[in-house]
Amino acid sequence: MTDVRAAIWMTLLNSARWERYYGILASRRERAERIVRFILIASAIGAVVAAVDQLPAAVGLIFGAFVGLAVAADATYKPGRDAVVYALIRDECCRYKTELDRLWRVSHQLDPAEAEQRLGKLADALHAVTARDPGPYSDKDNRAATAAVFAEAETGRVS
């Protein structure tokens, strides 16, 4: 039973780590989305001002280049879409973390085979959720999320 409880605990920590990791990625993409939108708005306003006020052609070209870059960045980088996907993955990780926490608290009362079966289902579901990650893996963010979870785990709880 100790092995099953250890596996449940490690999977619980893993789900908490993924929740934090995808929270970091979602937050970063949301910020990128706001920046790109700001650049688009500022560039569009600049282009309109250049056209209306008949500013020198160089100013109009600069604003036009900004608009072009912002539109290209939005079309290829898609920070808004990624932010939504990361937030959904984070929320699913949180749901599985809650279920794993419940399993952790009652595991000492369960038959080891039943606990192992429940753990297997939850671990598989957690893996399926994190496999939907649309972007490149971030080792830096993963290290930060892991450090935060293990620091919290030293208290005996994972939130």
Image (cartoon, helix red, strand yellow):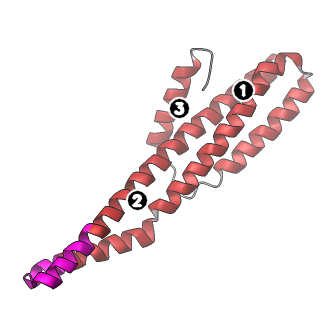
- Circle 1: residue type: Asp
Asked if the magenta segment contains residue 141, the reply would be no
Label 2: which secondary element: helix
Please name the residue shown 82% across and 21% down the image: 107
- Side of 22 relative to 63 (left or right): right
- Circle 2: residue type: Glu
121 or 45, which is in the foreground? 45
Binning the other alpha carbons within 10 Å of mark 2 as few (below 14), some (14 to 19) or many (20 upward) gives many
Q: Tell me the magenta residue range.
A: 42-62
- Side of 146 relative to 43 (left or right): right
Q: Which residue is mark 1?
A: 101
- In the rendering, which numbered label is found on residue 33? 2
Q: Position of residue 101 (x, y in %)?
A: 72, 26
2 or 42, which is in the foreground? 42
Does residue 110 appear anywhere in the picture? yes
Q: Which residue is mark 3?
A: 146
> For the stretch drawn in magenta, what is the main secondary structure?
helix
